[in-house]
Image: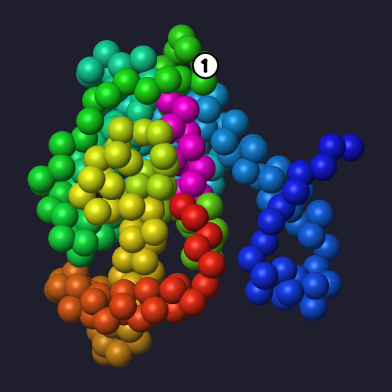
C-alpha cells in the first residue's frame, strides 16, 4: 500500500502523540471525504445547478452558496465560456448581493462595487460539457477545508471568499490579492467578524441580528484582528 507523508506543526504533532490518536485512519477518512467532494465538484455538468442534487452530494453547502453557484453558471453561459471559472464564482458572490463575503470585503476596505469579476479563461479538467475549471474546483474544495478549520457544519460564501483568495492559479485570486485580500487576511477577518457577531448575540437582549450588525462588527474588527495577528505571529505559518 503506498504511503503519503503528512507533516504537522511541532505543537500539533506533540498533542497527537500525547493523546494517542490513530493518525492513519483519521487521515484516510478525511482524504476519502475530500476526494469524494472534489470529484463531485469536477464532474458536475453545469447545464443547471439542481439544489436537490447539490444537497445530496454536498450537503454542507448553504442555500445562499448554491445561489452563488447558479449565478456563476449563468455568467459562464452568457459569456460563452468553456468552464465556470474562479472569476465566475467571484461574479456570483458579488451578484448575489447579500452575503457575509461582501461584508468581509467591506470590512477589509474593499468596496464590492469596485470589483469587476474577471472573465479570464481557465482550463477545465474535463473539456466538453460545461464544468468547473480546475482552479474553480480547487477553490471550492479549499472553501470546504476552511469551514472545517473553523469548526463550522456548513460551507458559506465567506468560506468561498477565503478559498478564492487562497487558490493560487485562478484569475479571481489574482484580483483579490491585488486588493490585499489574500487567504490569510480573509481568514483572519472572517474569524474576527464571527467573533464580533457572537459577542453581539451574547450581549443583546434582542436575539435577532440587529440591522446595524455590519457597522457594529466593523467597530470591533480592528482590535480583534490585531489580537488574532499577535497570536498567529507566535505560530508556524500553515500556508494558504
Quadrant where the N terminus sits is top right
Q: Residue at x 23, y 45 (%)?
A: 178
Q: Give the range drawn in magenta.
A: 133-144
Q: In the rendered view, does 186 fall on the left or right side of 211?
A: right
Residue on which the image places disc 1: 126
Residue 75 is at least partly visible in this image: yes
Q: In this view, does 23 lie to the left or right of 74?
A: right
Rate crowding at label 1 as few (under 14), some (14 to 19) or many (20 or more) other CA atoms within 10 Å.
some
Q: Which residue is drawn at 26% across and 60% down?
A: 104
Q: Residue 227 falls in which quadrant of the image?
A: bottom left
* Residue projecting furthest to the top: 128
Residue at 31% across / 33% down in the picture? Answer: 171
Q: Does the magenta stretch include residue 135?
A: yes
Q: Which residue is drawn at 42% across and 42% down?
A: 167
Q: Which of 45 and 119 is in front in this view?
A: 119
Drawn side of residue 7 relative to residue 47, left or right? right
Q: What element carries label 1?
A: loop
Secondary structure, magenta segment, majority class: helix
Task: Please indicate, yes or no, whether residue 207 appears anywhere in the rendered image.
Answer: no
169 over 163 or under it: above or below = above
Residue 53 part of the magenta-drawn span = no
Amino acid at each position: 500500500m503506498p504511503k503519503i507523508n503528512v507533516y504537522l506543526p511541532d505543537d500539533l504533532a506533540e498533542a497527537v502523540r500525547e493523546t494517542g490518536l490513530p493518525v492513519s485512519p483519521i487521515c484516510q477518512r478525511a482524504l476519502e471525504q475530500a476526494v469524494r467532494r472534489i470529484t463531485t465538484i469536477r464532474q458536475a455538468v453545469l447545464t443547471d445547478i439542481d439544489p436537490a442534487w447539490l444537497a445530496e452530494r454536498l450537503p454542507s453547502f448553504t442555500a445562499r452558496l448554491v445561489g452563488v453557484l447558479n449565478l456563476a453558471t449563468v455568467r459562464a453561459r452568457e459569456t460563452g465560456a468553456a468552464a465556470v471559472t474562479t472569476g465566475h464564482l467571484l461574479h456570483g458572490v458579488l451578484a448575489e448581493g447579500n452575503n457575509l463575503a461582501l461584508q468581509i470585503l467591506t470590512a477589509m476596505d474593499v468596496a464590492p462595487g469596485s470589483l469587476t469579476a474577471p472573465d479570464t479563461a481557465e482550463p477545465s479538467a474535463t473539456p466538453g460539457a460545461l464544468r468547473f475549471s480546475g482552479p474553480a474546483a480547487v477553490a471550492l474544495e479549499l472553501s470546504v477545508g476552511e469551514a472545517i478549520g473553523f469548526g463550522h457544519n456548513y460551507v458559506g460564501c465567506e468560506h468561498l471568499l477565503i478559498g478564492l483568495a487562497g487558490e493560487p492559479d485562478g484569475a479571481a485570486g489574482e484580483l483579490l490579492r491585488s486588493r490585499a485580500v489574500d487567504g490569510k487576511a480573509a481568514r483572519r477577518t472572517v474569524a474576527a467578524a464571527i467573533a464580533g457577531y457572537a459577542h453581539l448575540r451574547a450581549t443583546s437582549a434582542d436575539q435577532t441580528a440587529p440591522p446595524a450588525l455590519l457597522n457594529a462588527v466593523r467597530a470591533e474588527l480592528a482590535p480583534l484582528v490585531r489580537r488574532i495577528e499577535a497570536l498567529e505571529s507566535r505560530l508556524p505559518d500553515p500556508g494558504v
